[in-house]
Image (tube, grey):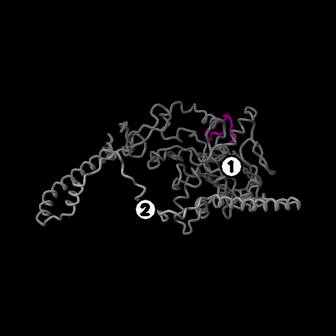
Amino acid sequence: MVSSHPVSPGLDADCEVLQFAVEMLRVVSWNINGIRSPLQGMVYEEPSNCAAMAVGRILDKLDADIVCLQETKVTRDVLREPLAIIEGYNSYFSFSRNRSGYSGVATFCKDSATPIAAEEGLSGLLATHDGDVGCYGNMDEFTQEELRALDSEGRALLTQHKIRHVIILGDLNTAHRPIDHWDAVNVECFEEDPGRKWMDGLLSNLECQAGSPIRPFIDSYRCFQPKQEGAFTCWSAVSGARHLNYGSRLDYVLGDRTLVIDTFQDSFRLPEVMGSDHCPVGAVLSVSSVPAKQCPPLCTRFLPEFAGTQLKILRFLVHLKQDPVFKQSTLRLSKQTRIQMHQNKACVRSTRPRPSKAGPSRGQKNLTSYFQPSSNCPQASPISELRSVVALMTPKTPEEEVMTKVVEGPASASEAKDEKEVRTSFWKSVLGGPLPMPLCGGHREPCVMRTVKKPGPNLGRHFYMCARPQGPPTDPSSRCNFFLWSRPS
């Protein structure tokens, strides 16, 4: 089985390929859009809040002997054991070597379907262990740098089982036929897309007439459901298109002709499984995969960080055996240093000035002695000082206090009210809050604000659009075409 992203130059795809020797075998593929993302909704269901149990629940829900995951979006430095090693399974990961949180594929095989070989990539350039699968196809038209750059993106993973047939499964990022795309009629040059041409050369047309070329692989879903419309596997999460099934079929299970015709019993989608913008796809085969006696070296349980063989820092610290002469000289030097430090301290104490016992100011000075009247400031006359002291010390009569409160009370209250209103109006002008959302033209409902993320002159600008999910233009319950630029604040 092979798990890969771009299987051909110009194709941004995630897929896996399986090779078997030939009971019932169930394989499932899912673009998980981050292996940790679907766990967020499941972790809270677990009483122990354990990630390992959450991953186990996903695998149990998919109920497959072999599960191929794309877009894991983890690199080796952030991969943790609970995500990689699940009881009853052996797993294999391919990581992006250049970007973090990007691409990445993984295959989880039940112990009853342990492969005999596994490797990263499609070119064989990343093969470093015994028992690798090897390279497939003629790649002479590509340079070594191109192949290594492709495999370094973590888009392909191969596992070989004890059967000589090939299955390619994963996200190929191409809607092959118009029936696989909701709005293929409005797609410019739909049939001329390079990805569709590549798939034309790979897949046999089951309805083709005699004399037509026979291709090596068959689209298993179209083999069982050739006329099924709306069989989509990917929807835009931003526009909520999954609610109205406005999407495309990008995920496939492809098998070689002999395997599909002789052993495939069913090919299916699982649109009820949430957690990603893709849904799982899979197939059931009437074959039995004989498990290997031991896992291939690429298995994650053999990684040093998970195998219990990682080195500790103490292994890098060596005990230094000192020479007796060197040790004696070191002790002599330290003794001389202590004597010198003692002499220096004594010298400092002897040079420190001692306070004189003679003199009237033997005790600590008062704080006020450090403040002297300024010569620039005019000194108040004794008469004015006396008047102020008399004014302060002369108590007011009860009648005077009542009159003071009657006069000053309303004035102070009015000033406080005016000051509060000024502050309130100021902060309202600064923190006015968002403006009310405009109403869309089609449904007269509040819009949603979006931000332009495409590079160009409008990058970062805000705009309003209909809040309903995207759907076919003929469906009145779908999003209308309302658009309005947001005015800069």
Q: Residues within 10 Å of mark 2 (few under 14, many from 20)?
A: few
Name the outermost residue toward the bottom: 47
The residue range painted magenta reads 202-217
Is residue 216 shown in magenta?
A: yes
In the image, what residue occupies the spot 27% across and 51% down? Answer: 380
Is 28 one of the magenta-colored residues? no
Going by the image, does 128 lie left or right of 108?
A: right
Element on which disc 2 rests: loop
Dividing the picture into quadrants, the one containing residue 464 is top left
- Residue 295: quadrant of the picture: bottom right
Residue closer to the observer: 263 or 489: 489
The mark that comes first in sequence, 1 or 2, is: 1
Direction from residue 474 to residue 198 in the image, left or right: right
Label 1: which residue?
94
Q: Left or right of 222: which side holds 286?
A: right
Other-residue count near label 1 (Cα within 10 Å), few / some / many at <14 / 14–19 / ≥20? many
Disc 1 to disc 2: CB gap under 8 Å? no
Mark 1 and mark 2: span between their CA atoms? 78 Å
Q: Which residue position is annotated with label 2?
A: 366
Classify mark 1: helix, strand or loop.
Answer: strand
Tell me what residue is drawn at x 62 percent, y 63 percent.
52
Residue 233 visible within the image: yes
Give amino acid for label 1.
Ser
